[in-house]
Amino acid sequence: MMQRNWYRFDFALATKLADYLGKERKFSKCREVFDDIINQGRVPSESTFHILVVAYLSAPVQGCLDEACGIYNRMIQLGGYQPRLSLHNSLFKALVSNPGILSKHYLKQAEYIHHHLVTTGLDVQKDIYGGLIWLHSYQDSIDKERIAELRQAMLRAGYEEDREVLLSILRACAREGEVEEAEKTWVKLLKFESDLPALAFVYKMEVYSKVGMPMKSLEIFREMQSKLAKADVAAYNQIIEILCKAQESELAESIMADFVKSGLKPLTPSYVFLLSMYYNLELHDKLEEAFSRCLEKCRPNCTIYSIYLDYLVKIGNTDEAEDIFNQMNSDATIGVNARSCNTILSGYLSSGNHLKAEKIYDFMCLKKYEIESPLMEKLDYILSLKRKVVKRPISLKLSKEQREILIGLLLGGLRIDSDDQRRNHIIHFDFDGNSGSHYVLKSHIFRQFYEWLHPTCKPSDNSENVPDKFCTIASSHFGFYADQFWAKGESTIPKLIHRWLSPCVLAYWYMYGGHRNSSGDILLKIKGSRDGVENIVKKFKAMSMDCKVKRKGRVFWIGILGSNSTWFWKLVEPYIIQDKDFPEAGHETKEQDAMETKDIYFNSDSDE
């Protein structure tokens, strides 16, 4: 109807359509109509705002919570509406529904909801106070005054501090080393009839470690074992970290032995603390032994390898250090970073191997890794002898592998934003933080495109923690991909896609936007036109793979079933990132994809 020349925008009709779509939980279609209303210079009705927020909150798709927050804020700021109490509470509950480490960046939004509840005279429930204190306790910098204000307001409203609130207070004390407040909170926790939660012991251990009392922390750990008859992973990792930092090696080793015998996992954080302690104490034999044990019991880890690399360079074993560095660089589950590059560069410079030092220097320039000042001073002299331009700018250029990776990820749903003139483009990498397969994939992609990433996405402390979302700098080099896959700002399938479906492309499409169900069938998700999907299906048939297509909303699912999935796996397996957390053939994958595909059946002729 909108494409007819007689069409005129009808606000009432658009409102009814948006509200209907939202009630049916079709949030994407509802958002399209919502945006049409905004683009017409009109303000959507209060019901449309409310229904769209609820639709986003009901969707199990990553990113919907952020969209719900944005619509909620616009409801108040743009529409001037007063959301219902139920909407305030539903959004707040969603903000604090994930683990604290994932939810802590929603503090500002949570405070905004609380502020609006207070200023409009609505009832502030106990869960709001408790949730705010919980979010504050996970912040990197604890706002003690704000926590105190919330506690007082909670008491004035007639709410008693329950065990969860007290646990949040203890967590905040642990971060700040507030012993006195921690002991007061501990006494209150003891008044509850049930056993103390294991985390309470962990936080109390951390409090005393912050004030330089590791033996008191050990005493608390023993008390935990006595009262709860066991210790959990968090407690073992905490006490081992405390003892290693205090360089109490015998005690740390004894508890580590108990930890290993318990069968609990993961062990990796504790091995990191042990290796760091052995390195600082120059206990080289023990470091070697701990590194070998770690490789037997844990997944390969960049931090573990980096400590071992530091040790090899420190003792002057450059040859073995080079082998370890090469192993890290070639293994996608380990990888190298600025720290490991500076370490091997230091080893080459110390041993006088200037040729290899230059190669690492070129590699670091390409990756835009920062070179440590003392090493740069030595390099300045070496490079000047060859009249080599120091710190020469290297023109960024996508490699063949990077180009194939991008095509695969774009088929799987990667997003590109372009400026108004479509000259420069930004690629947004967005990974599912709850997916084990995406966990290893995002680390690999982060390293593959490190030189292209925006400076704000690069950790300033050489941290190995890769964010779930990161983006590239704005560059004209991505113009081809923007024109082919994101023409007019929407996801499209290129007409020549059949020429680009190499095994590498298919592997990254599967890893980013694919799913393997319990029957071993492979499902590939893609957005675009029916013609584009048919083009892909024809290419698959030319590759001796039959497949079926189902449509669900704006998304097509291409099903590669039965023996065809086995052939598909043989094609892509050389490019699949090998890790025990990544789905092997026949295993289920991401929970989110499983939910999206649960109602899709390929045994019927219809593709709707």
Image (tube, rainbow, N blue to C red):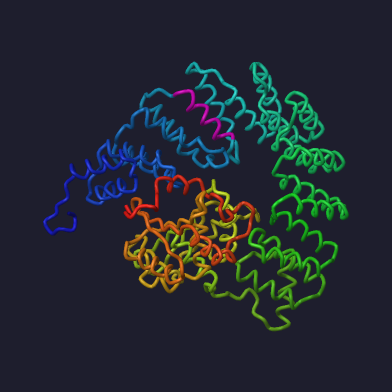
Q: Which residues are magenta?
A: 125-137
Q: Is residue 483 visible?
A: no
Query: Horizontal and vertical percent for residue 3?
Result: 18, 58
Residue at image position (77%, 28%) is 225
Q: Quadrant of residue 27?
A: top left
Q: Is residue 37 above or below residue 172?
A: below
Please state which of residues 382 and 264 is positioned toward the viewer in this rendering.
264
| Residue sitting at x 74%, y 40% | 263
Q: Is residue 195 above or below residue 103?
A: above
Magenta highlight on residue 128: yes
Placement of 192 over or under 419, stated as above or below: above
The relative height of residue 434 versus residue 365 in the rendered view (above or below) is above
The residue drawn where x is 26% and y is 40% is 20
| Residue farthest left in this picture | 6
Say which residue appears at 53% left-offset and 65% top-offset: 452
Counting from the top left corner in percent of width and height, residue 177 is at 69, 33
Residue 203 position in % (x across, y down): 68, 32
Residue in the foreground of this view, choosing between 3 and 181: 3
Which quadrant of the view contains residue 200?
top right
Residue 480 belongs to magenta span: no
Give the image location of residue 258, x and y in percent. Answer: 80, 38
Magenta stretch, main secondary structure class: helix
User: 17 left or right of 399?
Assistant: left
Residue toward you, 562 or 391: 562
Query: From the image, which quarter does the N terminus lie in?
Result: bottom left
Image-based side of 211 in relation to 23, left or right: right
